[in-house]
Amino acid sequence: MPRQPVYEQVIDDVTASIRSGTLKPGDKLPSITELCEQYRASATPIRLALRILDERGWIEVHQGKGSFVAQSPPA
Amino acid sequence: MPRQPVYEQVIDDVTASIRSGTLKPGDKLPSITELCEQYRASATPIRLALRILDERGWIEVHQGKGSFVAQSPPA
DNA sequence: CCACATTTGTCCGTATGTATC
DNA sequence: AGATACATACGGACAAATGTG
């Protein structure tokens, strides 16, 4: 079993939290700096995960403000 | 007017080429190394562009093989 | 099977710019 | 003005997949 990349782990964790209701529409996600600490990783995989989650419609990322759960996340 | 980031330029160029028919489904894109030379940029923005184009369904990227225009690109 | 070159994948650290608070 | 937060880009390192010989 090949181990899962950090950025995929973040994607899975966030989508799971949204699906389960732990994260609700409009909720603010931890900052990149905080996510780096949580996952003990650099900003590279964290930022990649957030960008992909944004592309897929799970979150909205706003410069200077932060990342927020989308109002209508995918099923 | 803020100038356009390199990765957005790549995205625009590739989507335009696909839309115009210059690039057809199944066609192989230049390698990352070649795109770096063409745009006189590092791999970072090139990779980002390819990843986003993949997420949006324009291309398919395969490790060890290359990037190929999707069989059914978006409208 | 092995060796090698090519190509993409993942991640790190760093620097600088832009937006928000 | 300063602090916080995200954006873009560079260079480098090592891993993994592919194709060829």
Image (cartoon, coloured by chain):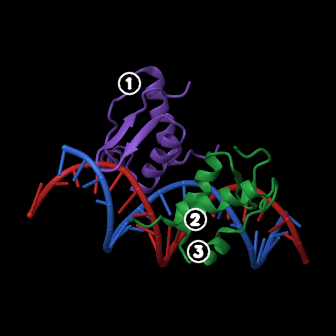
Chain colours: A purple, B green, C blue, D red
Marks 1 and 2 share the same chain: no
The verdict on a common chain for dots 3 and 2 is yes
Which numbered marker is on residue B46? Answer: 2
- The residue under the point 52% across, 45% down is A52
**Residue B42 seen anywhere in this rendered image of the structure:** yes
Give me the chain letter of mark 2: B
Q: Is residue A59 left or right of residue A56?
A: left
Dot 3: element: helix
Subunit of label 1: A
B47, above or below A23, in the image: below
- Amino acid bearing label 2: Ile
Q: Is residue A66 left or right of residue B31?
A: left
Q: Earlier in the sequence, mark 3 or mark 2?
A: 3
Q: In which quadrant of the rendered image does the N terminus of chain B lie?
A: bottom left
Quadrant of the rendering where the C terminus of chain B is positioned: top right
Could you say whether the residue bearing mark 2 is in a helix, strand or loop? helix
Rounded to the nearest angstrom, the CA distance separating label 3 from label 2 is: 9 Å
**Amino acid on which the number 3 mark rests in the picture:** Tyr
Disc assigned to residue B17: none
The quadrant holding residue C12 is bottom left
- Which residue is rendered at x = 67% and y = 45% of the image? B57
Q: Position of residue A59 (x, y in %)?
A: 44, 36
Q: Residues within 10 Å of mark 3 (few under 14, many from 20)?
A: some
Q: Is residue B12 above or below residue A15?
A: below
Q: Label 3 belongs to which residue?
A: B39
| Numbered badge on residue A24 | 1
Residue D3, by quadrant, is: bottom left
Nearest to viewer (mark 3 / mark 1): 3
Residue drawn at (52%, 67%) of the image:
B6
